[in-house]
Every structure is written in C-alpha cells, then in structure tokens.
Image: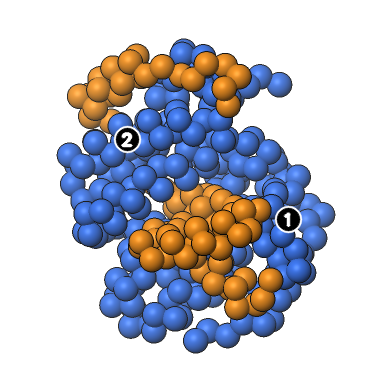
Amino acid sequence: MSESILQRIAAGEAKAVQECIDQYSRLVWSIARRFAPSAAEAEDAVQEVFLDIWKSASRFDPDRASEKTFVAMVARRRLIDLLRRRERRPQLTALPENFDFPDDEQERLEISVEASMAARALKVLKPEQRQVLVLSVYHGMSHGEIVESTGMPLGTVKSHIRRGLAEIREALGEEPSVDLGSSRKGEKRSTKGTPEAPGRKRSSASGRRDGGEEIP
Amino acid sequence: MSTVLHRRLQELFAMRATQGLDAAECRELEGILKVHPDWDDEGFDLAAAALDLALQSPPSELPTALQQRLQAQARSWTPPPAGSR
C-alpha cells in the first residue's frame, strides 16, 4: 500500500509538503474561518496549522484515523488554543436548527469514514446532548457560553459533552485509554474502511459509563 | 484507578478536545499523565475532529494571497531527515 501524504512528509519527502497544502488547505481554511474571530486571524492561523501538521506528521497513525481526521484534529487544537489566547468567542456560523447530514452514504464517506461514523453516532444521542455537542464542537463555544445560551447547569453541559464525545469515540472504534483496573493505551479496533464497524464489542468501560454516572 | 479519577480524566480529555484547558487544568492533566503516561490518548480529540468533519459544509476556496503565502511557507520548510521520526 502506498504511503499517505503525512507519512511521506515524516519520511522527509519535500514534494509531499506541497501536496499536503493542495489536499487540505480548503479544509483547514474552513475550520479556521469558523473558529477565528476575524479573517486576518484565520489566515495567520492557517499558516500555523500547516506548520503543526508538518511537524506532527510522524505521529499520524493510519490504523487509528484517516489522514483527514488527523489534519482536522491538529487544526482544531491550534484554533482552540488561539481562541483561548484571544479570550474571544468565534463568530457563530449558521447551522440550521434541524440540521441533517447527507443522506447519501457515499457522500458522507467522501468526507471521511470517521465523519460518517460520527454523524451516525450523533443522530442517536438525546436532543439536548446533541445540541450541546454541536455548540461546543462545531461552533467552538466554551462551556460557560453554552450555559448562557441554553440555560443548562454547567455540570450538565460538561456531562453532555463528555458523554457525547465518549459515544462518538466508541462509534469510531476507539478503546478508552483508561479503564478501571487497566492502564492500556487507547487503540483503535479494526474498523478502518468499515463504516458499520461490524462485530465491535462493547467494552466494560462503556457499560459502566452508561450505567453508573449521573448528570449533576 | 478510582472511578473519580477516571471520570475526571475523561472530563479533562473532553475539555481539551473542545474548549481547551486553562493553566491549572493543564497542570492537573500533566500531573496525572506524569504518573501514568500510558493513560494519555487522543480518542476524544479524534472524536471531536470527526464530528467537526461530519457537520462541515463544503469547504470554501482560500484567498489567493493566503494560498501564495502557504506555498512560500511550504518551499521554505525543510522536512526532518528520513528516519528521524
């Protein structure tokens, strides 16, 4: 199998750096425009994000995530950091109240396998959990801002985010890195390229999570 | 690991993936991971990134000036030598 762009960057191939821009600049720009308070800051952030991507290329593990998801993760980290430094909220980008995802499975798969899995996992969450997660992940709102916006208690907001992300992580086939009585590092189960993640078994941690916690 | 610590760690990972950590939370997470380095993972970060991708509208084109700056940056950036990963 041929190496991915990031693997080639990690191997020192200069041409792959340019390919990385060709492939992912629009994606990074989209995330930056949503998070950054202004277009000028978004432009600066995009340059910083690409430096981060190239420097962290060797950390990319194709068995854990697609390259696109990894790039989005690195971009989000840099932009979350930017927001914290600026102590300013992003401009809210409109997301229809009754938003939906592409019905066409192929269209969703073209975004990334993980995006398709995440979309499906989000759909089955409780409406209030879904709302909080979208405000947090898509709109980049802080927990405090979500409290102001929804009127939910802070503990509930935190709990919805934590549980919602845990659900999506599990849908992606990620094992929790920590388990009561275990210290095994998180690994992805073999779901690569299989949106249905067939045969995935629920971990004992997920059983505890669903059964043992209360929303404060 | 205690249930309380487990939940707190999950909370810190979830915060890191969404709004970031403040200085005290960073120190707290670093303190836990210093004792248990194997407990760090990017599961919540990847979950947030995947959800972000799922919710995105079609990406828009970059401003031309930014595209040119990126290309110049790519030309001047030197990848690490092979094998140094």
- Image disc number at residue A184: 1
Task: Describe the element under mark 1 as helix, strand or loop.
Answer: loop
Task: Tell me the kind of residue under disc 1.
Answer: Arg
User: Residue A185, can we see it?
Assistant: yes
Q: Residues within 10 Å of mark 2 (few under 14, many from 20)?
A: some
Asked if residue B59 is positioned above or below residue A100 in the image, the reply reads above
Query: Mark 1 to mark 2: distance in Å?
Result: 33 Å
Chain A colour in the picture = blue
Task: Tell me the kind of residue under disc 2.
Answer: Glu
Q: Chain of mark 1?
A: A
A53 vs A160, nearest the viewer: A53
A159 vs B55, nearest the viewer: A159
Chain B colour in the picture = orange
Q: Identify the residue at image location x=29%, y=57%.
A: A84
Q: Identify the residue at image location x=31%, y=21%.
A: B73
Q: Are marks 1 and 2 on the same chain?
A: yes
Picture coordinates of residue B4, whole percent (x, y) = 60, 78
Asked if residue A206 is positioned above or below residue B16 in the image, the reply reads below
Q: Residues within 10 Å of mark 1 (few under 14, many from 20)?
A: some
> Mark 2 — residue?
A48
Q: Identify the residue at image location x=33%, y=15%.
A: B76
B35 vs B16, nearest the viewer: B35
Picture coordinates of residue A185, whole percent (x, y) = 69, 52
- Image disc number at residue A6: none
Could you tell which of marks 1 and 2 lies nearer the N-terminus?
2
Q: Identify the residue at image location x=41%, y=35%.
A: A52
Apparent side of residue A146 relative to residue A41 in the rendered image (left or right): right
